[in-house]
Amino acid sequence: MPAAPPRTFDDTAGPARGPVGDGDSAGGPDATDAGSLRPRRTEPVMITAVAERIRSARPADGPVEIVGDADARVTGATLRAHEVRPGDLFAALPGARAHGADFADQALARGAAAVLTDADGAARAAVRDAGVPVLVHADPRAAIGPASALVYGDPSRRLDVLGVTGTAGKTTTVYLLEAALAAAGATTGLIGTVETRLGGRRLHPGEHADRAFTTPEAPDLQALLARMADDGATHVAMEVSSHALSLGRVAGTGFAVGAFTNLSAEHLDFHADMEDYFAAKARLFDGRARVEVVCVDGPWGRRLVREGGGKRTVTVGAPDADWRAEDVVALPDGTQRFTVHGPDGLVLPVAVRLPGAFNVTNALLALACGAATGHDPAVLARGLAEVRVPGRMQRVEVGQPFLAVVDYAHKPAAVEALLETLRAGTEGRLLTVLGCGGDRDRAKRPVMGRLGAQLSDHLWVTDDNPRSEDPAAIRAEVLAGARDVDGALVDEIGDRRAAIAAAVAEARPGDVVVVAGKGHETGQQIGDEQLPFSDVEELERALRAGDRP
């Protein structure tokens, strides 16, 4: 009989209110975990110093009890037992499905030097009899961020960290910001949904199986920032999800800039309602960032400015904002040229190779963030001109006489913006392939189906990442919204590869084919299987197959 695999604890369930994946993404089968990127060397930190850091960061949570040798030292931190390295502080967190303390034996066998947990975890035999110091705190999930920051040498004090939050536009803004800062001479890091990069070089993909965290867990984030600082980074542009803010993943991180894109209905399987969702995003603007840059072309951004606790706030997007765009010209190749009006009478011509009004706003936000760190906007703007973002309005071209696009749009507002943008730029038909992910907010499915049918000439409803749900049941919910649209042409093809091929086969010169929902992803999660699948590759394959009319 083969040996049983080692038990692992991965607290991806979070609070009992629902899953904590950052979106509908599913990573490729060969992705590398963020936890593998640590600084090459750390100085040992005493347990008493860790306890004091937690006390100072979380005074309202009560005392930190140390059971065992208070003079012991730790050299790393993790909340996953199977990723423990010798000398680590193991954070044994309570989760919806299990308690991390039940996996302390595995962490100890791998060399954990101390355990951080709550009273429940400390009472369990594996921790009680561990023989290493135990830090007992009322909220270990909130405590592991500041603890990890100390263990890894407070890396955000050595970097300008620029955090971007919001429902849509985070990824694009972060790529634009990375390019702008690099043009200004900064050595840049990037942390986000698609990948982690340093100096423009990919360190690892942003996903691992179906644990697709836009923002890494706190110990991984602090280790990653320390590695970037050690390797010469000066600025790090990172996406900050509402899950990260709710679950303390960015606790212990200091931000030079906190930026807000927009807010629309999303992640309501995790957040109780839009107020709860907004409150999570607003945590980035509680004074932890030296400068707050807020898009105010919508009601949530304007509210954030009114209620924010920052020392300095810069506004973007609206006609009366500090940064605004005028004279926008959309060129046939998707490039947009516009004039930026900024503080102190700034007037600056800017170009981006990304279509859509929302990408003008994303570029404005990136410029304002870069300027907030002291860089010349004119130099920053040079970096924007050639930015291409994987899976965001990504063109797939093999010489076909029509436009073919892959986009990550997987929520109603994003689908609407995507299709309206493409519709405005074509005189032909808009042919759309669209699905919804499983184990995520069900309420958005009929809405996305309705929008897809309203805004497309032909809609194919297909599978996305069904995960543990019945794919046909998901499609039925999308179709319910699509078939409410009078006169809409809607087909159902569950096989995503076949749906893409059907859309391409129908395309004629001047049409637009758009495959929405998975964007940059390289896998499809079906039940317990993670299958290789890339919309970009499948679309290219379909375009190359057969003769185009």
Image (spheres, grey):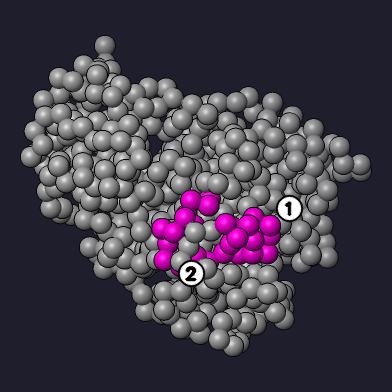
Place of residue 515 in the rendered image (x, y in percent of width and height, measured from the top left): 66, 50
Instruction: Depth check: give the residue in front, 435 or 180.
Output: 180
Among the 4 quarters of the image, the one containing residue 424: bottom right
Residue identified by numbered label 2: 312
Instruction: Depth check: give the residue in front, 475 or 9.
Output: 9
Q: CA distance from mark 1 to mark 2?
A: 33 Å
The vertical placement of 506 against 108, above or below, is below
Instruction: Depth check: give the residue in front, 285 or 516.
Output: 285
Place of residue 118 in the rendered image (x, y in percent of width and height, measured from the top left): 29, 28
Disc 1 residue crowd, few under 14, some 14–19, many 20+, Cα 10 Å: some
- Whether residue 238 sits left or right of residue 230 in the image: it is right
Q: Amino acid at mark 1?
A: Glu
Give the label, 1 or 2, closer to the camera.
2
Query: Residue placed at 46% from the left, 66% from the top?
Result: 311
**Total marks placed:** 2
Q: Which mark is residue 112?
A: none
For marks 1 and 2, the one nearer the N-term is 2
Residue identified by numbered label 1: 416
The vertical placement of 101 against 204, above or below, is above
Place of residue 124 in the rendered image (x, y in percent of width and height, measured from the top left): 25, 18
- Whether residue 444 sits left or right of residue 256 in the image: it is right
Task: Give, as a single range, the part of the protein colored magenta.
Answer: 281-307
Place of residue 541 in the rendered image (x, y in percent of width and height, measured from the top left): 60, 51
